[in-house]
Amino acid sequence: MNLTPYQDYRRKIVENCGKVIVGKEKEITLILTCFLCSGHILLEDLPGTGKTMLLRAFAKTIGGSFRRIQFTPDLMPSDLTGINFYNQKSGEFEFRPGPLFANVVLADEINRATPRTQSSLLEAMEERQITVDGTTSLLEEPFLVMATQNPLESYGTFPLPEAQVDRFFMKLSLGYMTREQEMQVLARPSSAAELIGELEPAVTPEETAYVRGAYSQVRMSGEVLGYLMDIVEGTRRDGAFSCGVSTRGAIALYKAAQVTAAFDGRDFVIPEDIREMAPYVLLHRLCGEGGRKAADFAGRLNQLIDRIPVPLERV
């Protein structure tokens, strides 16, 4: 397996996005990992941390189309999927595609829309298609959704049920920049919008198609796969969690570890790949009694992983 394209692809993406977003190389790599695995991202963060700029830069970098949807209580499913409208000139109904017909979609403040509208987005994420008036249309590949939530304001929101949160491949948070990084941004002669306008695609569609398909060739030994399952089953047995990681979550961790290994120039997964990806892929899938959420379980998950014996490399 040729792993050079993976390292080159990551370098191109991180460097190009870094022209706009400063100091977020780790987060860009995580978004890229999710993108290669055909997953979607739930981003819970404070306003003004660069979520929209980052995703716009990512879309420009891969040469894809970008659409942003501001979720509000009056947003209807048809506002996402599109509608059939009557063309008086032709005397026929024509389909007008909605904003989901894009390669990269930012669903801003998803928890402000009603459950019906949330479900229409999640269906498109899962099925990669939408149905309007009995007609099914396939969404263009690649297709990535990043949904955001504001952790501070909960009044008038419709929290996503655990079953729907589980459909997101990763849950991330950008956080604030360091003092030095923020000073660098403030002193830039051009605005972020101008910098994004100047960005050119850094990769070709052929490169994207290759890295999104070939990572499945990365091997995982029986011992390392057993280690992954020990972590997954541990979340199901731990009394701190009312529900553990689903099979969907186990598959997501498997894929994320494969991509991580490929980025590091290996055609095999090691336990460190699994440990590195576990918090991002598993934490939001855990829930507890009394309304406790994933953020409360970060320490508990780390303790669980530390207790599990790591398989040793064979000499």
Image (cartoon, grey):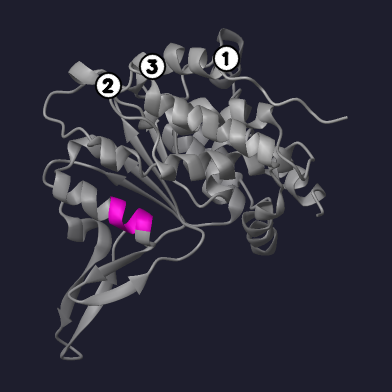
* Amino acid type, callout 1: Asp
- Name the residue carrying label 1: 306
* Coordinates of residue 255 in the picture (x, y in percent): 58, 45
**Tag 2–tag 3 contact (CB < 8 Å):** yes
CA separation in Å, label 2 and label 1: 21 Å
Residue 142 appears in the figure: yes
* Amino acid type, callout 3: Phe
Q: Earlier in the sequence, mark 2 or mark 3?
A: 2
- Name the residue carrying label 3: 297
Residue 124 is a magenta residue:
yes
> Residue drawn 70% across and 58% down?
207
User: Dividing the image into 4 quarters, which one contains the N terminus?
Assistant: bottom right
Q: Earlier in the sequence, mark 2 or mark 1?
A: 2
CA separation in Å, label 3 and label 1: 14 Å
- Name the residue carrying label 2: 288
**Tag 2–tag 1 contact (CB < 8 Å):** no
Question: Which numbered circle lies on residue 247?
Answer: none
The residue segment tinted magenta is: 122-126
* Coordinates of residue 206 in the picture (x, y in percent): 68, 64
* Coordinates of residue 220 in the picture (x, y in percent): 68, 43
Q: For residue 224, what is the image quadrant?
A: top right
Q: Is residue 51 above or below residue 175?
A: below
Give SS at disc 2: loop
Give SS at disc 1: helix
